[in-house]
Each structure stands twice: as structure tokens, then as C-alpha cells.
Amino acid sequence: MEANHFQSFRLTSRIIKDEYALLPQFTENKIFCRSEEIKLIEGLRPITEGKPAENIFVHGPTGSGKTTLVEHVLNDLKINSKAVVVLTNGWDQSSSMSVYTKTAEALGEIFFRRGISTEEAFERIVKRMEKTKIPVLIVLEDVEGLVLDGEDTKLFHNISRLRNKKVQFCIICISDDRTILSNLVPKIRDNLRFVSIEIKKLSHDQLLQILNNKAEKGLVPGSYSKSVLEKIASKEAENSGNANIAVEVLRRAAKTAESNGTDCITVEDVEEVCYEFDCYNLNVPREEKIITNILRTGGKTYSEFFWLFSKQLARTSKRVRVYLENMERKDLVEIKKVQRGKRIIFEYIKLK
């Protein structure tokens, strides 16, 4: 019988014992941000006592552990309170209505989005909360996807204006951009009074601890050395301090070593991965990479730029403008804009 190549490959995997443990989805139990964790717990503690909690804004570099920190605290909160936690992502739920729909589903209040206004959706959620007396905590990861263009902030507006002692809403916003909530009008920000929690870039020692933990779970004992982990931690500490990138370098280096037929990862494997896969740009969003590549050859009119972008990725013009404005905020691109009536038109875009 002819050999099964996939089975043969699986049997000869001598370095990786559990690849799942080396993926970003595998959440670490280790929390380094102890003071930030305490601040987050203190902000949410009133929920466990039936009182209103603080609205919280968690911000810091990509891969610094923002989401891990929030998930860690929320796991404990679920045990100690009856609050309904609604996890959303600003790019997946990029409208107030989509967040309302997910919140309603979590409360057992099902409604069809078509034919119902955002105001009616919010009122039905409030009535459900009055009836059940269950507080709702909405987590908005990548909140920039929801507020960046400033056009749909109904969610924040409605919660900020709510004056009902029987209903308790709490919002946790998560973003890489510490200024992102400036897209909300001052009155909404003043009413919601977000408590700011900044997560710092991970240090060399913290990255090394994470890599040690990942290696113990995902790699065969003796298949890696301390010098390999030190090399990865040092390189990423010099760059963005992104734990996800550091772990991805380790995983790819293990794959490279296996492909070379060896039983141990070497420093040379790490260097090869860094060179071939440009690992230290992995934290740049795909959309930003596409935009940068398009503009490398020179500035473009918006119509020309959008045509080139659409050939690589299907997005609406409105969403592409959001990407561009985000890069403008980071001082990566320069956009020439003109106002025509009530509309702001993008005329010309170039790299800075």
C-alpha cells in the first residue's frame, strides 16, 4: 500500500508536540500587569455588589496582553456575579445595531435587525434588563472599528444618556490607539467617564517567560535551548515587544528545524525565520500593508488608489477611508481633503 504522506509527516514531527499551544488563540494564564489588573478589578468590583461599575478604556501596544488581561479578570467576574458579558470586536461588529443584536441574544431577547431602528433595539434591551435585573458588560475589542469614522456612535450616546437605576450597563473598550476615544463627542466622554488603563510594551524578561511557558507546553523537551528563547526575546524586545510575534517566531523556527530534518531548534533557524518571513512586521494589519505597497510607487488620487486597493481586497469605500484615516493618525500617510457641501472628499493620498 502506498504511504500516506500526511500521516508520515505527522509521525516524523520530532520537535512540536502540541502546535495549538503555540498559536495566538491559546491564552496564557500568566498575567504580568499586576497593578493594571488590580485597577481593572477595582473598576468592575461594584457589579458583584449590585452597583454600577466604571466604564474602562484599556490601551497599549499590539501583543502587550490587553485582551488577555481583560479575559482573565472577566473569567473571575463571571463566577462572582450574574452579569452578562458581551464580547464584541469593532471590526466584526462595526455598527451600534450589530452590538445591540449580540447583546440582545446574550439576554435571550431575539429580534430581527431588518425593520427595527437602533433606538427601538436599545429600548427592548433596556426593558429586558429591567425585567431580569441582570447587569450587562459590553467588551469592545478593537473599538476603533466602531468609532473611527465617528458616524455611528449611537451605542455610546444611548448608554451615556440612560437614567434608569434598574439598568446597569458597563463598557470596556480595548485599543492600540490611546487617543481613539477622542472620536466621541466631549459630552459623551464626560458622561461615560472612562477610567484609562495603559498596558506597557512587554520587556525582555516578560517575553522570555512567555516563550518558556509556550515552549514547555508546545515543544518536545530537549528540542530547544535557552539561547534560542533568549534570541527571540531579545529581538522582539528591541522591536514592538509583541508576545504574539515572539511566539510565532518560535513556532516557525520549530517548523524550519523539522523541515531540515533536525531534532533541535538552533539560533540559525530563528535568524532564517526572521529574514525569510519578515516576522517583525507581523503586527502591521493586512490593510495597512496593502496601502503601503500601493503608495510606495508614489502618491495616488483617491479613485486610482481605491481601484488598486479593491483589486487586492474587497472593502467598501467608507471602510477604506477609515483605514486611511487611521494611518493618518499614526502619521504614516498624508491625505489631501476637500469639503463639498457636508461631505469630506479624499482627493490625493501619499506616504509620509
Image (cartoon, helix red, strand yellow):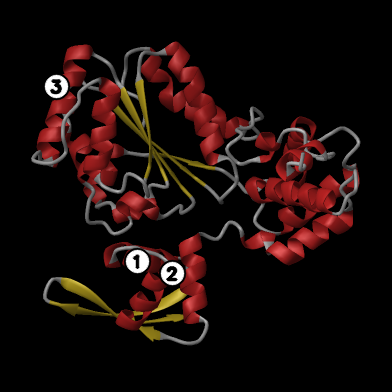
Answer left or right for 39 relative to 169.
Answer: right
Give above or below for 136 relative to 186.
above
Residue 10 placement (x, y as % from top left) = 75, 38
The residue that appears at 31% across and 52% down in the rendered structure is 147
Answer left or right for 215 relative to 87.
Answer: right
Q: Earlier in the sequence, mark 2 or mark 1?
A: 2
Of labels 2 and 3, the one closer to you: 2
The kind of residue on which mark 2 rests is Gln
Depth check, front residue: 304 or 233: 304
Q: Which residue is mark 3?
A: 127
The kind of residue on which mark 1 rests is Val
Residue 111 placement (x, y as % from top left) = 16, 30
**CB atoms of marks 2 and 3 within 8 Å:** no
Q: Earlier in the sequence, mark 3 or mark 1?
A: 3
Give above or below for 247 relative to 294.
above
Can you tell which mark lies on residue 25? none
Give above or below for 282 relative to 159.
below
Q: Tell me the CA gap for discs 3 and 1.
A: 37 Å
Q: In this figure, what is the number of numbered marks?
A: 3
Say which element carries label 1: helix
Depth check, front residue: 262 or 326: 262
Can you tell which mark lies on residue 312? 2
The residue that appears at 65% across and 56% down in the rendered structure is 240
**CB atoms of marks 2 and 1 within 8 Å:** no
Can you tell which mark lies on residue 320? 1
